[in-house]
Image (tube, grey):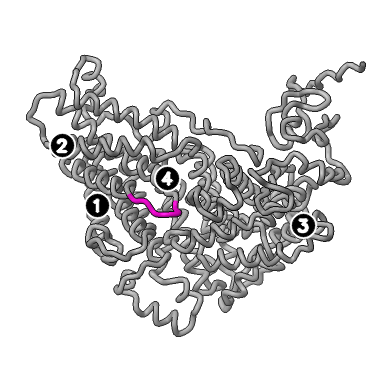
Amino acid sequence: MTEPEPPAIRRNGLLQSCEPCRKSKLKCDHGRPVCGRCIAKGFTQRCFYHPAPMTKQDSPAPAPNPGQRLAKRPRTESSNDSSPTSVPTVQSGLRTTERPSTTPGYLGSTSFSAVFSEHRADISFEEGSCDVDSVFAMMKGQSRLETGVEVLKFLHRSTICDIVVRKFYAGALMAAVSGLIIEAIVQSVRRILDGIDCSKDLEKQLRDLAQQIFLSSAHPLTSHSSMTVEEYFASFTDQNLRWEAIGILLSMAGIALMSTSDSDPDLMRVAPGAQAKDMLRTQVVEASGICVGFCDTAASVSELLGFLQYDDMLLRTQYYGDTSYVAWRKLGDLTATIYAAGLHQENTRAQNCPPFLQQWRKMCFAAAFYADKSLSTFVGRPPFINYRYCTISAPLDLSDEDLIAGGERLDQAMSNLDAAGWNPQGSNHRGSMLRLRFLLAVLREQALEIALGRFEDSELLNKYNNVIEAARNLWDSCPVTFRHDQCEKVEGLSPSFTFARRHIYLDYLYTLFLVQRMVTKRTNTGHESLFNTSREVLAIILELTNERHPGVDNSRHQSWIALYYGLPSASILAFELLRQTQEAGPHPVMPPRSELIRNLSVFVSCLSWVASPGQGNYRTCKAVEKKLSDILDQVLDPQPTAQQRDFLDGGHDGLYGLLNWYSPDNFDLDPFDFPAGDGFPF
């Protein structure tokens, strides 16, 4: 019997990895002739050790036999090869050493070409419509083409994606991407995939389609001032279908699946078991990421890529958890696109842009800006996007229907707006919500400067007063329709609208909380304002977590809200209760003890069920549940010790030298320690 060939040693002294593991950047166990990972993944036909892995080949390696590649495909429960319940596995995209695009994107006033740009009227410029190198870069490598085929195959059989996206948009009021764009993409993708003749060579048809999508994606999106919405949609659908559009559909399907109840009839039909549902969600997350990877070598950046990266980032916060570095890194990628596309500048390409697209680009920036401030607040890190370098204004309070109608209808809608850009009659469409969230995010950035920056106490108080005054002026000026504190409970309002209104009010209150907490820590004043804000935030959190809607699973949203808004407020109140229990008075402020104990007990109970096992925020919720439970136990059964007093005193900061609730390190958690799912390989 022939002895197995010993592992080869690389120049750096490490063992050589097989080609599938090397290209996928996965750890190989270096087994010969086939490594253990490839055996487990069913890649035995692909596993080999290249004698010179870094050399380029004149021609691509032959594609593996499709039947062999899909032979080990994971299957949903009670699935078969011809039924819609069979969910194909998308293989990870293999990255190649491609030459990056040479298209620079937006160049600002200090760029090397600024002087020439300021004299465009004096000299002529020729701008190429496409970087030829990037066309070949997008298509280079048989593995990337095959991965694109797998994504299309997954979409071809997964009509559930269309269904859940449409259900989600039926009540979505804070979605970044217009429902009109989503519907155009869904119709186009399904029209193309339904046109495939399954009686003929399916692999060849999908390979030709993937090749065409790569070619379309390599060309930059263009617009002109008289462009109609139909022309805009046609630039990334049908014959011009792009990976950005497919990725938007997949990422939105993932977001929708995360909030779809496991008992939903449509979901039960294609994934009847819990394992099948988890596999489907995992596959959609990975497919979305693959499409983002395909766009990395695109010839240009655009709002369409920004929408894709925003949705993909949001999807990963729900899948991996909000403290995950994966989501944080995706936010950085989104920021790079926002700047490179010039979406942060008011007049960038405005002369070549129809009014509806100008507003949609503003909404893209507004959504990214808000997400940047929210995630930065949650993890306690400086935000990526600095509004000091942005000239973009808030999107107007206009509906998508008014925007695409144009002409007299758009003129009439704009004339109805007040001087601040609001519709005085009140409205509850997507543009209104994105506008208000953006305006609040501008103030949140100022609050983060106070919370994370370094200021003298006198300067701190001035900034504090400015932020508080600006926040209250903004809140007083916005339409009463959006003000949770001014609206009586009205029957008949949609659950999505009441949820959005409460969420926006929490954003407003939490900005006040951040600056109040910092001033109290630094100056030992303002306790009453901080406690009152914390009590109001906690009360609203309990209202939100108590709501249930048939067919909707809000657990991922509720866990985010509980951790993001509720935990800091609850911890402030819990520690104050503990201090007043263990220290004799008088105390500067005496919050209502019975109310706090009751609400904190309910909040701790919420943390025990608000996130399910396997969800990204589950372990964080369980960790902080234990911490708050311990504090309540000490409040209800006080047994003060010297160690507890030292802990409360915090060295020199007194009560407010508290745990840093924005740092996951204090929870002793590993954000990447999430349950591995079957389906797409990580």
Q: CA distance from mark 4 to mark 3?
A: 37 Å
Amino acid marked by disc 1: Asn
Q: CA distance from mark 2 to mark 3?
A: 65 Å
Indicate yes or no whether the magenta region holds residue 551: yes
Dots 2 and 3: beta carbons under 8 Å? no
Disc 1 versus disc 2: nearer the observer: 2
> Which x, y percent locates residue 612?
45, 38
Q: What span is colored magenta in the figure?
A: 547-552
Secondary structure state at the residue bearing disc 2: helix
Disc 4 versus disc 1: nearer the observer: 4
Q: Residue furthest front?
A: 78
Secondary structure state at the residue bearing disc 4: helix
Q: CA distance from mark 3 to mark 1?
A: 58 Å
Q: Which mark is residue 482?
A: none
Q: CA distance from mark 4 to mark 1?
A: 36 Å
Q: Which residue is mark 3?
A: 206
Q: Which residue is mark 4?
A: 555
Which residue shows up at 92% across the image and 16% down it? 1
Q: Residue furthest bottom?
A: 408
Q: Residue furthest top?
A: 642
> Which x, y percent locates residue 595?
17, 40
Q: Which residue is mark 1?
A: 466
Q: Earlier in the sequence, mark 2 or mark 3?
A: 3
**Left or right, residue 583 beside residue 648:** left
Amino acid marked by disc 4: Ser
> Which x, y percent locates residue 623?
39, 29
Q: CA distance from mark 1 to mark 2?
A: 35 Å
Dots 2 and 4: beta carbons under 8 Å? no
Dots 4 and 3: beta carbons under 8 Å? no
The crowding category of the residue bearing disc 1, from other C-alpha atoms within 10 Å (few below 14, some 14 to 19, many at least 20), is some
Q: Which mark is residue 594?
A: 2
